[in-house]
């Protein structure tokens, strides 16, 4: 079975590694996606276990078309009853990179017309469209004159873990947070601190990694459950195997934030997943935050300065650098920010620079290795 896992730009290699560990074959890195091969069990595992995937697509039909008549004809030639029942609702989304077709919604509309017309011609009835919660979701990808139609096995986006209870002003996406943690090489034996935790996304993703808890452990429905060939017994086996491997021992994760509302939101999430006794979290300013161990890792997502004066944001980043240098010797500090000028005020030389995207914002994810004395003395 050919499959494609969608992700954010910059996380493709991390996702490929996750797939390799799950047993995927024919892994190929694409732009914001990874293609791979596997059986139905791997499809189920991919939806349950992958931390850096947004959704898992199963390509079912490819063809060439250069105009709307070709498109309608080609879609009409495919037997859609193999993937869609008359009693089921469906929806189509499309992504278009083509000079022949310039409007993605129009492409989706023509595909929809061809599918419902096929059912009407055969049965006298047509399936219904449901854009919010369809039984079956199709994805159309167009590159030049090449069309690939896939069926979405995930349903809702896989970034929805089920722990976010309240709206936060600028929440970090769950897939991005998990990708950041995996990019650092962090392991549960290393003490972890997020001193500006906001709504607690990094804390939650880190705790699930430490516990070997699948990110979708509390999810009840997936797109593949509405497929004609869905096997409930196989899914139950995949789920129970994953559940039996959860291990909550030896967690050393700490968080803090200056905002009481952020702390409350973080604690709600921890309580919902039963982590409130495993993760220490307090209302505290970063400048007052001191580590309990002599070594460890710090990951933070400070403000980028969109709503602050330039001098204020530069001063904040300068203070961050000074506090790290004075109080976090022995730690590796990772900082995510879209403000490249402000990052210079950290005053430390990054040992690694990665490019990630927080929504539409291009960010630098930088590592600072903090030593007692100079780097020369450390060496």
Image (cartoon, rainbow, N blue to C red):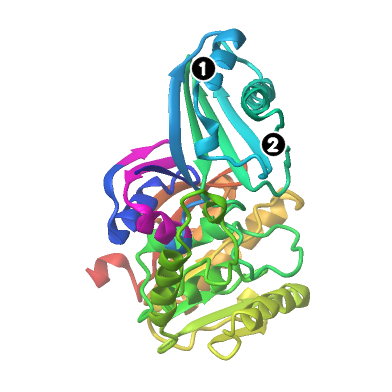
Q: CA distance from mark 1 to mark 2?
A: 19 Å
Is residue 24 at least partly visible in the picture? yes
Residue positioned 54% across, 56% down in the render = 225
Q: Quadrant of residue 125?
A: top right
Q: Between 337 and 150, which is closer to the camera in this rendering?
A: 150
Which residue is outermost to the left? 379
What element does badge 2 sit on? Answer: loop
97 above or below 226? Answer: above
Q: Quadrant of residue 31?
A: top left
- Whether residue 21 sits left or right of residue 32 in the image: it is left
According to the picture, the residue beneath numbered tag 2 turns out to be 127
- Whether residue 39 sits left or right of residue 107 in the image: it is left
147 above or below 152? Answer: above
Image coordinates of residue 83 in percent, x first then y, are 52, 40
According to the picture, the residue beneath numbered tag 1 turns out to be 74
Is residue 345 at least partly visible in the picture? no
Residue positioned 67% across, 46% down in the render = 134
Q: Quadrant of the C terminus?
A: bottom left
In the image, the segment drawn in magenta is 28-47
Neighbour tally class for label 1: few under 14, some 14-19, many 20 plus, Cα within 10 Å: some
Image coordinates of residue 219 in percent, x first then y, are 58, 67
Q: Quadrant of the N terminus?
A: top left
Q: Which labelled disc corresponds to residue 179?
A: none
* Sequence-wise first label, 1 or 2: 1
Residue positioned 59% across, 65% down in the render = 161
Membership of 20 in magenta stretch: no
Membership of 30 in magenta stretch: yes
Neighbour tally class for label 2: few under 14, some 14-19, many 20 plus, Cα within 10 Å: some
Q: Quadrant of residue 368?
A: bottom left
Q: Between 237 and 126, which is closer to the camera in this rendering?
A: 126
């Amino acid at each position: 079975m050919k499959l494609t896992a969608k992700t954010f730009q910059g996380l493709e290699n991390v996702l490929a590694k996750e797939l390799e560990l799950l047993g995927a074959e024919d892994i190929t890195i694409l732009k914001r996606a990874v293609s791979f091969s596997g059986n139905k069990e791997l499809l189920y595992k991919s939806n349950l276990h992958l931390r850096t995937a947004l959704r898992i697509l199963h390509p079912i039909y490819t063809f060439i078309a250069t105009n709307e008549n070709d498109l309608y004809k080609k879609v009409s030639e495919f037997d859609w009853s193999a993937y869609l029942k008359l009693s089921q609702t469906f929806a189509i989304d499309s992504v278009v990179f083509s000079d022949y077709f310039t409007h993605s919604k129009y492409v989706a509309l023509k595909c929809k017309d061809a599918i419902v017309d096929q059912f009407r011609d055969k049965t006298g009835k047509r399936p219904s469209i449901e854009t919010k919660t369809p039984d079956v979701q199709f994805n159309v990808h167009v590159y030049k004159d090449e069309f690939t139609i896939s069926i979405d096995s995930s349903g809702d986006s896989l970034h929805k873990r089920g722990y976010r209870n309240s709206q936060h002003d600028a929440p970090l996406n769950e897939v991005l947070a998990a990708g950041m943690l995996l990019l650092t090489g962090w392991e549960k034996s290393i003490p972890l601190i997020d001193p500006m935790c906001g709504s607690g996304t990094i804390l939650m993703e880190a705790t699930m990694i430490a516990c070997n808890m699948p990110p979708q452990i509390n999810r009840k429905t997936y797109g593949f459950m509405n497929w004609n060939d869905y096997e409930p017994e196989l899914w139950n086996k995949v789920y129970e195997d994953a559940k039996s491997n959860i291990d909550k021992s030896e967690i050393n994760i700490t968080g803090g934030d200056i905002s009481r509302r952020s702390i409350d939101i973080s604690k709600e999430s921890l309580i919902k997943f039963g982590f409130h006794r495993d993760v220490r979290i307090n209302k505290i300013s970063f400048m007052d935050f001191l580590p309990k161990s002599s070594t460890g890792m710090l990951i933070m997502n400070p403000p980028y300065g969109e709503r602050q004066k330039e001098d204020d944001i530069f001063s904040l980043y300068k203070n961050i650098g000074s506090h790290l240098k004075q109080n976090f010797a022995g730690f590796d500090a990772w900082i995510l920010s879209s403000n490249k000028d402000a990052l210079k005020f950290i005053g430390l030389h990054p040992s690694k620079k990665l490019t990630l995207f927080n929504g539409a914002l291009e960010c630098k994810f930088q590592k600072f290795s903090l030593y007692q004395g100079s780097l020369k003395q450390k060496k």
